[in-house]
Amino acid sequence: EWTDIEACSTCQMIGELILNTKLKINEKIASNLFLGIISDSDRFVLKNTTAKALRVTADLIEKVNLDFTPLYDILYMRSMNEIRFQAYIANNLEITENNFGFIELTPEIIHQFNVDFATASNMINNFNFINELLVWIFISYDEKNDLYKINLRSRGPVINTIANKYNGGGHKYASGCRIKNKEDIELLKKELDEACKEFLKERE
């Protein structure tokens, strides 16, 4: 068992393991590890980025002479349906006076834009550089499992301890949870709004 809470991603850890043992690596392996590190650190802009993460990435590139620029298309190329869906989220995201943002994406909305439930999860980091947001969540209903899936992101307040209370968890600033009823969603929103309020007070 190997745990590293400072690692930005599992891919970083796998990269470390390969680079420091007799395990072999090729271009395909290096490409997949590079994509995992880039996506989980959001191109090295998230707070989980460390000097070690940068070193491992550089070593992976150097090891196989990886041409990494074309790989970004795999992560960031989008259809117009997804761009319009992102615009819908931006236009309908509710934001409290404490800079907490939330939106519920119903099955009807998902179908309207001809996207899937994973699309919202893939977009949540796109809202990382908005002045009016400290914490934001996307709520979507999983019809198959009859529960609400909630993605949480933060630019300051620690959110994983709150997510832990609602059948979830994750990193300090990037978490998720699964909730069965609307009442718990409202409780989660109140806790996150309060966390933003406390963070703003401390920052003053």
Image (cartoon, helix red, strand yellow):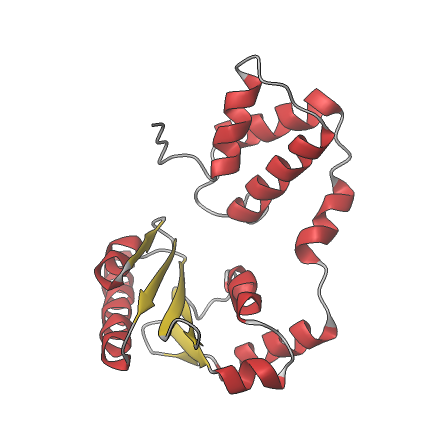
Q: Tell me the quarter of the picture where residue 122 sits.
A: bottom right
- The quarter holding residue 101 reads bottom left
Task: Check the picture and name the quadrant holding the C terminus.
Answer: bottom left
Tell me the residue at 54%/77% (across/down). 90
- Looking at the picture, does residue 51 appear above or below residue 194? above
Q: Position of residue 79 (x, y in %)?
A: 73, 69
Q: Is residue 141 above or below residue 125?
A: below
Q: Is residue 48 above or below residue 134?
A: above
Choose between 131 and 77: the one closer to the eye: 77
Q: What residue lies at 28% left-to-right and 81% top-to-bottom?
A: 182
- Give the x, y percent position of residue 75: 66, 53
Q: Residue furthest front?
A: 144
Res 175 seen here: yes
Residue at 50%, 66% (x, y): give it. 130
The residue drawn where x is 40% and y is 75% is 102
Q: Is residue 100 visible?
A: no
Horizontal and vertical percent position of residue 111: 59, 83
